[in-house]
Image (spheres, rainbow, N blue to C red):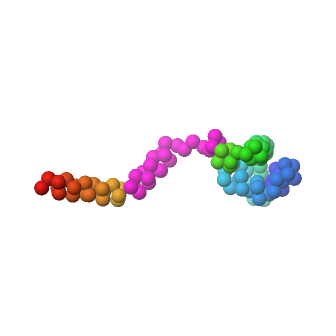
Amino acid sequence: MRVNQLDREIGVNGDTVRFYTRIGFLNPVKDPVNGYKEYSPKDRRFLRFILSARQLGFSVNDIGQPYRPIPSIPTIMVRRLHYFQHWRGPIWKLSCLRQSVIILTAV
């Protein structure tokens, strides 16, 4: 099922389908012959769920929270490493400042 078919069947704008695809809620498979994205029945059901939840007032973030993939341990470690590297300079400066305070108060 293509975007225009979902558009007709469910009654949503094609841009809406593309938006939910872009943020990872829908996972179409690209047809190797023509390059069109093909949406599965699962995508169609989830799109209906998304639209219903949105009508009930749920945010996009609320809807996606339970469906976001759990990152692997290496992914988490890389993210943490980047986070700590970001703080490396300020921590070093604080350490130097601490040493200065210790030296000044010891005199």
Residue 83 highlighted magenta (yes or no): yes
Q: Residue furthest left?
A: 107
Q: Residue at x 44, y 53 (%)?
A: 83
Picture quarter with the C terminus: bottom left
Task: Answer with left or right where residue 56 lies relative to residue 80.
Answer: right
Where is residue 18? Give x, y as percent. 74, 56
- Toward which corner of the image does residue 89 lie, by quadrant? bottom left
Residue at the far top: name it: 66
Query: Foreground: 30 or 9?
Result: 9
Left or right: residue 95 versus residue 9 is left
Residue at point 17%, 57% (across, down): 104
Closer to us: 45 or 95 = 95
In the figure, residue 85 lies in which quadrant? Answer: bottom left
Q: Residue at position x 77%, y 51% from top?
A: 38
Q: Is residue 56 magenta?
A: no
Against 96, residue 45 (above or below) is above
Q: Position of residue 4 (x, y in %)?
A: 83, 56
Instruction: Tell how many labels.
Output: 0
- Whether residue 30 is visible, yes or no, is yes
Q: Mainly helix, strand or loop, the magenta region? A: helix
Q: Which stretch did the figure color magenta?
A: 64-87
Residue nearest the observer in this picture, 30 or 75? 75
Front-most of 88 and 45? 88
Pinpoint residue 33: horizontal percent, then vertical percent: 77, 57
Q: Is residue 99 left or right of residue 55?
A: left
Observer able to see residue 47: no
Q: Residue at x 50, y 47 (%)?
A: 75
